[in-house]
Image (tube, helix red, strand yellow):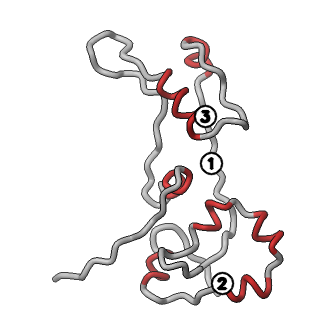
Amino acid sequence: MFQGCCTHFPIWAQKGYTLDLRSYVAEHLDQAVVDDWDPVQYRSFFTAEGMQYGLPKYHGALALYYNKDLFDEFKVDYPDGGWDHDDYLEAMKRLTHDRDGDGHTDLWGSMVDVSWDRIQVHVNGWGGISSIRKTPHTA
């Protein structure tokens, strides 16, 4: 048993360095335990072929920060627990503007702080899957 993370852990599984945990999970974990994990996070520990190579250790919670003054200025409702991705997208479009009138957007409603080992939550959140492509090593 070992801990893995982020960019290297899926690669270990794809290279065959890990054991398929599906039978162990089925035999030793109550479904209630599995159901307690965030589904997106839980599914991230499966290869494209369906092998389960890990279990969540912690959630790595993300937070949504927003500027209430901008929401107020453009009469956009504040985010709440009922928002889905479509609600978020619509609000962000309403907050995106060309403030100085030069024909170029200079106020963006949203941004993703891209850290490549953390971007997967956004891919999964919109229904995508991750697959690190295996490419032949060339010298």
Residue 104 locus on image (x, y percent): 29, 20
Is residue 6 left or right of 43 when viewed as pictured? left
Identity, as a three-letter code, of the amino acid under mark 2? Arg
Q: Is residue 98 above or below residue 79?
A: above
For numbered disc 3, what is the local secondary structure?
A: loop
Instruction: Please give the name of the residue rendered at 75% of the width and 70% of the height, measured from the top-left corner.
Output: 34
Q: Which residue is mark 1?
A: 62
Is residue 76 left or right of 108 when viewed as pictured? right
Figure quadrant of the C terminus: bottom left
Mark drawn on residue 111: none
For numbered disc 2, what is the local secondary structure?
A: helix
Identity, as a three-letter code, of the amino acid under mark 3? Tyr
Residue 120 locus on image (x, y percent): 50, 58
Q: Is residue 36 above or below residue 29?
A: above
Q: Which residue is mark 2?
A: 22
In space, the residues marked 1 and 2 are separated at their CA atoms by 28 Å
Residue 66 locus on image (x, y percent): 59, 29
In space, the residues marked 3 and 2 are separated at their CA atoms by 37 Å
Instruction: Please give the name of the residue rendered at 61% of the width and 77% of the height, measured from the top-left corner.
Output: 54
Q: Residue furthest left?
A: 139
Task: First in sequence, mark 3 or 2: give its number.
Answer: 2
Pointer 3: residues within 10 angstroms few (<14), some, or many (20+)? Answer: few
Instruction: Please give the name of the residue rendered at 46% of the width and 89% of the height, measured from the top-left corner.
Output: 16
Task: First in sequence, mark 1 or 2: give its number.
Answer: 2
Instruction: Please give the name of the residue rendered at 48% of the width and 62% of the height, measured from the top-left corner.
Output: 129
Figure quadrant of the N terminus: bottom right
Is residue 81 left or right of 134 when viewed as pictured? right
Residue 86 locus on image (x, y percent): 56, 36
Residue 76 location, quadrant: top right
Q: Is residue 97 above or below residue 42?
A: above
Q: Which residue is mark 3?
A: 65
